[in-house]
Amino acid sequence: EIVLTQSPDTLSLSPGEGTTLSCRASQIVDSSYLAWYQQRPGQAPRLLINAASSRATGIPDRFSGGGSGTDFTLTISRLEPEDFAVYYCQQYGSSLPHTFGQGTKLQIK
Amino acid sequence: EVQLVQSGAEVKKPGESLKISCKGSGYSFTKYWIGWVRQMPGKGLEWLGIIYPGDSDVRYSPSFRGQVTLSADKSINTAYLQWGSLKASDTAMYYCARGGDTPLVAWSFRYWGQGTLVTVSP
């Protein structure tokens, strides 16, 4: 099983700031089968990025994904009030199960 | 418009059985994987398994194999998650989600249901 470790667990920032969230895998994630999701309180998760760096339809360009192998990042260039939420990475390659990271909570400072 | 509509909240007792549903619309139901994700109260996301409704190919997480059963009825565009004997530790929100359009994203979850809250209490 591939274990995904996200850092930090919690991040306190102000609107307008930028940030980079990290997701490290215990084994290589083949073909960059790595996704990022956003979950706001009381809502279902929302896909932001898949294939490591491809923004999903309708996602603002302030969100960008990068990385390969075992190290992946989600960058948010200018935080908007609605971006304060929990973010999860997920690997969905040939290695089952398709694990999620433990999540990074982005909160308003 | 792609939609996944899940069945309503359930309150059950330990030892009871349960089957919850996820009805897809707005797309060809048999051509996309549907996965199930658990979220225990105040916790993160856990992947239970995934099913391809076209041929009912199912892949389970080892942690959940034998604990739950995934199935699909393509005649009514509905996927199911069921338990034979519930435990208090099954109390959680359960989401279904649909896979993407191309091989590179087929197993990532582009569309999500609204969630079904399952509460298991004596």
Image (cartoon, coloured by chain):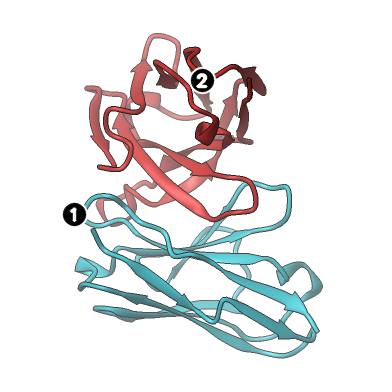
Q: Which residue is drawn at 65% across and 19% down?
A: B11
Question: Along the line of sight, which residue is nearer the eye, B66 or A68?
Answer: B66
- Disc number for residue B34: none
Element type at mark 2? strand
Element type at mark 1? loop
Q: The cyan chain is which one?
A: A
Q: Residue at x 70, y 85 (%)?
A: A78
* Figure quadrant of residue A101: bottom left
Give percent across and percent down for residue A60: 63, 70
* Figure quadrant of residue A107: bottom right
Circle 2: residue type: Ser
Question: Along the line of sight, which residue is nearer the eye, A62 or B17?
Answer: B17
- Disc number for residue B21: 2
Subunit ID for the residue under disc 2: B
The extreme top residue here reads B75
Circle 1 crowding by C-alpha within 10 Å: few under 14, some 14–19, many from 20: few
- Colour chosen for chain B: red
Give percent across and percent down for residue A15: 79, 83
Subunit ID for the residue under disc 1: A
Residue under label 1, please give it: A94
Determine whether, in the image, residue A88 is placed left or right of residue B69: right
The extreme front residue here reads B122
The extreme bottom residue here reads A17
Circle 2 crowding by C-alpha within 10 Å: few under 14, some 14–19, many from 20: many
Give percent across and percent down for residue A46: 58, 54
Q: Quarter of the image for the C terminus of chain B: give it.
A: top right
Circle 1: residue type: Ser
Give percent across and percent down for residue A74: 50, 78
- State the CA–CA distance, disc 1 to disc 2: 26 Å
